[in-house]
Every structure is written in C-alpha cells, then in structure tokens.
Amino acid sequence: MLHLNFHPFPELKTERLLLRRIKISDAPEIFFLRSDEQVLQFIGKEPAANEEVAKEFIESINLDIDANQAIMWGIALSENPSILIGNICYWRIQSQHHRAETGYTLHPAYWRKGIMKEALLKVLEYGFEEMKLHSVEARTSSGNLASAAILKSTGFVQEGYLKEEFCFRNKFYDTIIFSKLK
C-alpha cells in the first residue's frame, strides 16, 4: 500500500523546466489549456466556459493534493517560472496496486520541442523513486499520434486498444492504453 505525502509540495526541475504547484493566479493559462480547441482536440471535453471555471478546477486540484489523492504540476520554463505553458499529473492513484495514471496538456506554441518528454521523464522519476509506484498508466485517443510518440519514447508500451471507448459530440473514439513499469 502506498503512503503518499505531497507536503511540502514537490517542485521538480529539469534543464529547461520548473514543475510547480498551480496557483489561482494561473487561472488565465489554465483557462486557455482547458478551452483551446487544439489542446482539447483529443481529450473529449467541452471547452471551459470562463476563467471562473478554471479557478474552480485549480481549487479542486489543490484539494486533491492536500488530501494526498492526486498531484498536478504546472509546467513553466525555468527562465519564466510565473507563466504556465502546460500541466502534468498523477491521478486515479491505486495505492494498493502501487499504480497511477498520468496525463498532460501543453500550449500548442510549445509542441514538438521536447518539452513534454522532458517533463514526463522527471515526473516518472518522481513517481517511481519518491511515490514508490510500480507502474504508470497513460491513455490517449488513437488519433493523438504525438502523445503516443512521447509515451513510446519514454519507455511506455501499448497494453490495450479500446474500440469506440468514449463518445463525444455524438461520435465514438478509440483509446490506446499504455503503461510503464518501474
């Protein structure tokens, strides 16, 4: 059984990135990530209506962190740590199985620059070494080739393929399940 403790909040650093706690003042960036059609194209969620919804999401995230139930980092460039360009998390944590699911989003201006791979490698290191996870799961829409490539390049392997697993706007989508063992 995992015994998680996200206090104090674990800031993570890489060569180019700072992975930090998301604050209410990050609401404009979170609103963008949760409302931009490019970012949402493979997620299957309606766009956030306004910044107030983004603030509620941030409050919800921070409650989960405080309760040691999930953790989300805001991704910022080290040279400009006050501006979020994305986020990455562990959620759906199964303590008894030492397993968690990871998920992430990134501002389109930073796609294809190796940023998400860099962030994911650091979060995996934290998950396996500090959280004592045994396995990490990731799910992506079958059409999200970029996300699948990131997962494969960081050592994830495809474990499953769910045909028409979710419905969004009256259309069914396939999901690919990946995992990585410690």
Image (spheres, rainbow, N blue to C red):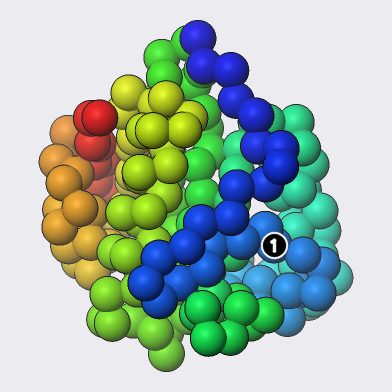
Q: Looking at the image, can residue 34 be seen?
A: yes
Q: Residue at x 73, y 74 (%)?
A: 26
Name the amino acid type tagged 1.
Ile
Q: Nearer the viewer, residue 57 or 67?
A: 67
Which quadrant would the C terminus be assigned to in this image? top left
Q: Give the image location of residue 82, x and y in percent.
A: 67, 80
Residue 102, placed above or below residue 112:
above
Q: Alpha-carbon neighbours of circle 1 within 10 Å: few (<14), some, or many (≥20)?
A: many
Give the number of marks. Answer: 1
Q: Give the image location of residue 134, x and y in percent.
A: 32, 23
Residue 170, placed above or below residue 182:
below
Q: Say left or right for 139 vs 40.
A: left
Q: Give the image location of residue 31, x and y in percent.
A: 69, 75
Q: Give the image location of residue 159, x and y in percent.
A: 17, 34
Q: Residue at x 65, y 37 (%)?
A: 6
Quickly name the residue at label 1.
22
Secondary structure beneath disc 1? loop
Residue 167, placed above or below residue 116:
above
Residue 80, placed above or below residue 7:
below
Q: Nearer the viewer, residue 70 or 51?
A: 70
Q: Residue at x 17, y 62 (%)?
A: 149
Q: Nearer the viewer, residue 164 or 40?
A: 40
Q: Say left or right for 39 vs 82.
A: left
Q: Looking at the image, can residue 172 be seen?
A: no
Q: Residue at x 76, y 74 (%)?
A: 27
